[in-house]
Amino acid sequence: MSKKIVPVRKNEEIIMTINDIGTEGQGIGKYEGYTMFVDGALPGEEVSVGVIKAGKNYGVGRLIEVLKPTADRIEAICPIARQCGGCSLQHLSYQGQLAFKTNKVQQLMNRVAKVEGVTVLPTIGMEEPWHYRNKVQFPVRDVNGQIRIGYYAKRSHRVVETDICYIQDRRNETIRQLVLDWMTTYGITAYNEEKHKGLVRHLITRHAHSTGNMQVVLVINGRRLPNVDKLMDSLQSCGYVSSFELNINKDKTNVILGDKMLHIFGDTIVEDTIGDIKFHISPKSFYQVNPIQTEKLYAKALEYAELTGEETVLDLYCGIGSISLFLAKKAKKVIGVEIVPEAIENAKHNAKLNGIHNTHFYVGKAEEVIPRLYKEEGITADVVVVDPPRKGCDEKLLETIVAIAPKRLVYVSCDPATLARDVHFLTENGFEVGAVQPVDMFSHTTHVETVVKLQRQNP
C-alpha cells in the first residue's frame, strides 16, 4: 500500500477556499483534497493560511489574510474574540449565524437522522443578541505569581482577560474586579492547576433576568476562606447580590463544583420568572443560560406537545422542573426525572411555589428510573419530553420510550449531532418527524438548541 502524501508542510503558506464551519467555529476547506481547519475563516472565502500542523488526515492553519471575503463577514466587536473560547462566530453577521445554524441542523437531519422530506424551520433568533447570558464561570488562576480572572482561551486552560464580555451581564465586570481587588489586598492565592495549589479556583455568578438579583459562588481549594467577611461587605455594597456561597472543591479535577456548599449571606437560591412561572434555582441546578430565548423554546415545546388537559406526560432530564411546570398547566399529570438531587428538591419546591399539584418528581438516571417504573409499576404516557445533556439519550431509555409508545415525543436538544443520532433510532422504531425548530440560545457561538416533534406512526 502506498503511503498517503500530505500536500502541505508545517510553516508553509497556502491559498485555499473555505466551504464549511467546524464545531468550534473553525473554517473548513480542502487543499488538494486535504482537509484544513482554519480559525477565523468563513465559508465562501478565499484565504491565505499559515500551516501550523500537518497531520496524516488533516491539518490546522493560521489565518494570515482574507483574500476574498464573504458578504457575511463583519468586524468582531470584542478585542479578544480570536483568542477566547466563548464567541467563535463574532466575525459572522448575525443573519449569517442563524443561516449557518439552520443549515447545520438540516445537514445532520439529512445525513445522520436520515429523515426524508423534512425541512428544518429557520432558526428563531434574538432581537438583541448581546449580554444575554445569565451565568458565568470565571476560572481564577495563578499565572507566574499574578492573579488572572477571565475566560479560557480556545482549546486550552490558559486564561485570557477582558474588561468587557459582550455576551455576559455587564455587572459581572464589577463582581470580577471586586474579587480581584479583595484577593490582591488580603493576599488570597489563586489556584495553580498544574501544582494543585492555591485557594480560589472559580468565580461563578448567576443573575435573575426578571428581578436583577445575582448569586455569587466562590469555589475554593480548601475548607475556609480568610477575610471572607471583607469580600461579603464588598458584595453587599453592590445592591444586587442577593446570595453568596462558598463551594469546597479540593479534588484534582476539571469538574468545577465540589460536593459541599457553605452559605455566607442572603438566600441559598436565586429566583427567576419565565412566562408566569417562578423558579428557585440553587447553585448546582441546571437552568437555561438565555432567559429571553428560553421562553420561546419552552413555548415551542409546549406547542409540539399538543396537550388537551387529559394527558400523562413524562419529562426526562427535567432539571429544576422548568419544562415540567409549563407542561403541568396544560396536562393531567407530569412525571419528571432528574439525576441531580438538589435539582429535584428545587423542582418540588417550584411546583409548590406556583401552586401546581399534578407533578411527581424522581431522583435518578432517566435510563434507570423509567425502565423500572415501566416494568414494575406499569407506567404509561401519552406524551414524552426529553431534554438530555450533550451526549443525548441512553439507548436503554430510547428502547423504553419505544415500548411505552406515547402518541407524541418532544425532543429538546443542545447538540444537533446526538439529536440526529437519537431521531434516527426513533424513526427506525415507529416514530416519524413532524417538525424541527432550531432556537438560537447561544448567539455568536456554533451551538444551537433544537426542538423536534415526533409522532408515533399508526398509534
Image (cartoon, helix red, strand yellow):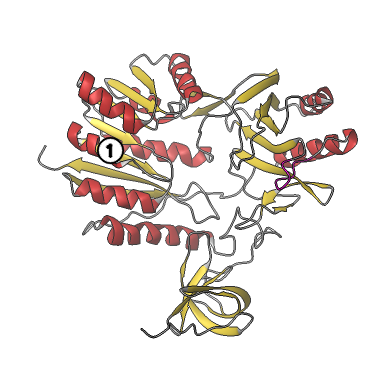
| 441 is higher (above) or lower (below) than 337 | below
Can see residue 310? Answer: no
Quick check: 148 left or right of 354?
right
Residue bearing mark 1: 396
Q: Position of residue 35 (x, y in %)?
A: 46, 75
> Which quarter of the picture shows residue 198?
top right
> Which quarter of the picture shows residue 91?
bottom right
Image quadrant occupied by the N terminus: bottom left
Magenta stretch, main secondary structure, is: loop
| 159 is higher (above) or lower (below) than 53 | above
Q: Position of residue 292 (x, y in %)?
A: 51, 39
Residue at left 58%, top 68%? 39
Can see residue 6? Answer: yes
Q: Position of residue 369 (x, y in %)?
A: 32, 26
Residue located farthest toward the right when viewing the structure as drawn: 185
Quick check: 253 left or right of 160?
left
Quick one: 396 or 244, which is closer to the camera? 396
Dot 1 amino acid type: Lys
Residue at left 59%, top 27%? 259
Q: What is the span of residues highlighted in magenta in the rendered image?
A: 190-196
Image quadrant occupied by the C terminus: top left
Residue at left 49%, top 80%? 17
Quick one: 282 or 357, which is closer to the camera? 282
Residue at left 39%, top 26%? 364
- Residue 343 forms part of the magenta stretch: no
Q: Position of residue 375 (x, y in %)?
A: 21, 24
